[in-house]
Image: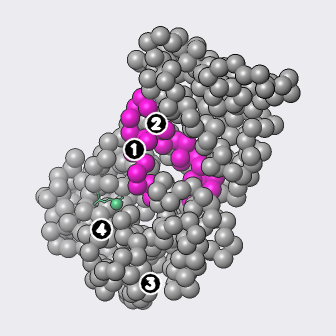
Amino acid sequence: MSDVTAIYYFRPRADTSPEQAAQAICEEETTGTWTDISTTTEYVRRLDGAVESVEPKGQGYLTKITYPAEIFEPGNVPQYLSVVAGNLFGLGRVEAVRLLDVEFPRELVTFSGPKFGIDGVRRLVGSQNRPHVGTIIKPKVGLNPTDTAEVAYQAAIGGVDLIKDDETLTDQQFCPLFERLPAVMARLDQAKTETGRNVLYAVNVTTRADKILERAEHALELGANMLMVDVISAGFSAVQALAEDPSIKVPIHVHRTMHAAMTRNPEHGIAMRTFAKLVRMLGGDQLHTGSVSGKMSHDAEELLGDNRALTDQCYGLKSTFPVSSGGLHPGKVQTELRVLGTDLILQAGGGIHGHPDGTAAGARAMRQAVDAFMEGIPTVEYAKDHYELDRALKKWGTS
Ligand SMILES: O=C(O)[C@H](O)COP(=O)(O)O
Ligand SMILES: [Mg+2]
């Protein structure tokens, strides 16, 4: 079996050399600990990791560490994480350390990946190459099921491909999930009758481990055509449980609330790349990876690499649809698509429901901005004979 390769950025403590710090990480995550031990037998030594390189980078260093595949339990992602992203973050000999990327050998990718992937989701929606437009129902909490369904209907007739719950909406009393879901699906059926378009609704089934499958299966009985789960707060096993359940025959939309506690600091934590690779392996059909121009901070180069990790060849797994979301509006569409390409879902909450003429007009404006890009026409130019887009640009501008 080939090794697992992990790349880390780190800054050693003042009294520790970069080589000693990298070695400390490697030993902690394989066969060693803080001191020599008498229990290490000869046959254990073949499970030692190796520091392959240490080189200066910015204020610190980059290191490439290989871990023998044998120390991983195939198929157990919590265990994978406990090696490549485990105790090392707390080691006193490093001031800061960030896991930048990881490569798993074929033998450890024992998962089937997304059931639908980009092509499968496109088939459900009936799109060819264009980016998808999605919306998050806003306000994120507070609306009752009937009003939630009305907002969903307005977005659907305006032209969105995807509607989703926000991350803090699950099954609260003001909007019970099993009342909200049939209400939304009924209005999406109405929109389909009127427009002929199939719109997906990612209903948020995130909950405690022992209840999530039951919740998802009940959602399917009530007609759900997509499920949403929050991967960091619910855990990677939640994505896997949903994706591997044979009765779940709808795509899985993966949100990443809480990720920035680990991904944001450029010197310490876990870069999104590892999470993206794991979500794809575990079967997420869509994953939020960030935007280049929205409300959340992001490094464009890193984001491009994260999206590529979802779409580049990976042991024959289907690709995961990257979702750009957070502070988007029609004026930002050209920038997002120019940098991130058209295999992308552009999601706007405020940028649709905040349109001066309401949700349906907001959805139309987003679709018009996408059409402008696809036709190679600057947004401002296209807005001259597209009223909803023009109104959106007057409110939010183009940056
Ligand atoms: O969950 C999300 O992606 C956010 O709710 C986006 O909302 P916004 O478009 O209003 O920023
Ligand atoms: Mg949100």
In front here: 357 or 226?
Answer: 226
Residue sitting at x 40%, y 31%: 266
Closer to the chain start, of discs 2 and 4, is 4
Q: Quadrant of residue 238?
A: bottom right
Q: Does the magenta stretch include residue 5?
A: no
Whether residue 279 is visible: yes
Amino acid carrying label 4: it is: Lys
**Do callouts 3 and 4 mark residues in contact (Cβ within 8 Å)?**
no
From the viewer's perspective, is 224 left or right of 294? Answer: right
**Residue at image location 70% in from the left, 18% down from the top:** 36
Q: What stretch is highlighted in magenta?
A: 255-284
Q: Say whether disc 2 or disc 1 marks the residue closer to the N-terminus.
A: 1
CA distance for labels 1 and 4: 21 Å
Residue 171 appears at what percent x and percent y? 40, 76
Task: Say which residue label 1 marks.
Answer: 261
Q: Is mark 1 within 8 Å of ligand 2?
A: no
Q: Nearer the N terminus, badge 2 or badge 3?
A: 3
Q: Distance between the residues labelled 2 and 1?
A: 8 Å
The image position of residue 268, as x and y in percent, is 44, 32
Give x and y (percent) for residue 213. Answer: 59, 73
Q: What amino acid does circle 1 point to?
A: Ala
- Taking depth in this image into account, of 64 and 330 the one nearest to the observer is 64
Q: Residue at x 57, y 61 (%)?
A: 239
Q: Which of marks 3 and 1 is nearer the N terminus?
A: 3
- Mark 4 Cβ inside 8 Å of ligand 2: yes
Picture disc at residue 140: 4
Spatial CA span between label 2 and label 3? 37 Å
Q: Residues within 10 Å of mark 2 (few under 14, many from 20)?
A: many
